[in-house]
Image (cartoon, rainbow, N blue to C red):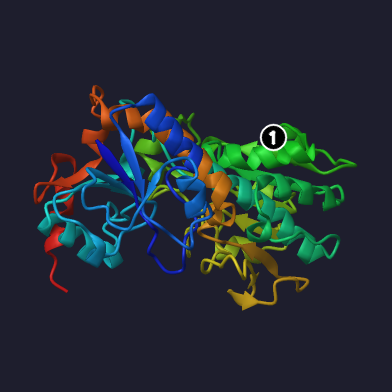
Amino acid sequence: MKIGILREGKIPPDKRVVLSPLQCESIQSNYPHVEIVIQPSNVRKFRDLEYSNLGLIVQEDLGDCDILCGVKEVKKNDLIPNKTYLFFSHTIKEQPYNRDLLKEMLALKISMVDFETLTNKEGYRLIGFGRYAGVVGCYNAFLAYGKRSHRFNLKPAHLCDDRKELEQELKKIDLPPIKIVVTGKGRVGRGVIEIIRILGLKEVSKNQFLENKFNEAVFVQLDTLDYNKRINGEASSFSHFCKYPKEYQSDFMKYAKVSDLFIAGHFYGSDSPYLFTRKDAKSPDFRIKTIADISCDINGPVASTLRASSILKPLYGYNPQTEAEDIFDKKDVITVMAVDNLPCELPKDASIDFGQEFIKNILPSLVGKDRDDIINRATICANGKLTEGYKYLSSYVNKSI
């Protein structure tokens, strides 16, 4: 079996890759029937020479590969018929900008395995870049706080060579006794907490956070039912919330009244309550002045997120009274960090982390027997047809423009 590692072709350029040079070498050593071929790239964080120096083949033509792996969508003109592809296709939510890509893959009889849909039998995702979204998003939260308060100035994450350098930058952080609220306990939330732990910040309980004053910076990490409550006042459970989100309302304002910095790393499902609305943000009780929205749902659950920001310009201001953008460090304006491609800021570390999950959770089923149907469940289309689990995309594919 021959696996090709694709050159990323999307603009703006993405420096990430599915597997690092050492990971490719390890796979070939542990799976003698597998050969890995690398498509050359002058953008990728790992240089071509780093692959070839380990004896890996670096060549332009991947036509004789059985499986082709990339991170982001492949350009339609670069698709090779009758191949198996793995990448983030961004089609399963019927994204209009990738409709033609899915149509082309169907026409070329490509088997499309989407990284986003690779799950275990319980439905939990097996691979993703969420951890490094959390790591970089948390770092950027403090970068934003430093710029707003003019207390310290961190080097942008994308200018750090790797996580080691980023962690050195954390030593510059000088915090007053602020309260930090973090939402989410999944991959993103765990990445956020990694950085907070390195800073040595004190974690407090929900009641302590709401009721007490502190002489040092503290944080609280909230899960879904910590900031959502049943409208009728009855007891709630996570499974009930997932089934009947419309029966809940946000309880986040009690935290917004006492918090200075909000790091949003939650997953937002459709029909769930917004954490806070534009009306909430207008309230004199709304104290938060810096928000790092890692989840980055535009005009959604975090009212201040008007748009995604960019790696080069990560900050903008949200004026609660005008409900419009403003100068980010103005007194009554909320500083917003809403970069939507955060792992790209640490491409080397994010790629290695992704590759580790790929080797552990995906590779055995990909190159051996797919005993748990991991690959099968994640295959969106094959042999020119949508697979059973993705037939709901038929109207999306056939929709006339």
Image location (x, y in percent) of residue 47: 51, 54
Looking at the image, residue 15 lies above or below residue 401: above
The answer to which of 366 and 197 lies nearer the viewer is 366
**Residue 188 in sight in this render:** yes
Residue 322 placement, left or right of 52? right
Image location (x, y in percent) of residue 167: 73, 45
Q: Could you say which quadrant of the image residue 373 lies in?
A: top left
Figure quadrant of the N terminus? top left
Residue 284 placement, left or right of 272? right
The answer to which of 378 and 301 lies nearer the viewer is 378
Q: How many marks?
A: 1
Residue lying farthest to the right in this orientation: 215
Residue pictured at 48% horizontal, 42% vertical: 21
Label 1 packing within 10 angstroms: few (<14), some (14-19), many (20+) = some
**Residue 250 in sight in this render:** no
Residue pictured at 46% horizontal, 39% vertical: 355
Q: Could you say which quadrant of the image residue 336 lies in?
A: bottom right
The answer to which of 6 and 167 lies nearer the viewer is 6
Image location (x, y in percent) of residue 140: 67, 56
Figure quadrant of the C terminus? bottom left
Amino acid carrying label 1: it is Lys
Looking at the image, residue 202 lies above or below residue 383: above
Name the residue carrying label 1. 206
Residue pictured at 40% horizontal, 27% vertical: 29
Image location (x, y in percent) of residue 312: 61, 69
Residue pictured at 34% horizontal, 37% vertical: 243
Q: Could you say which quadrant of the image residue 113 lies in?
A: top left
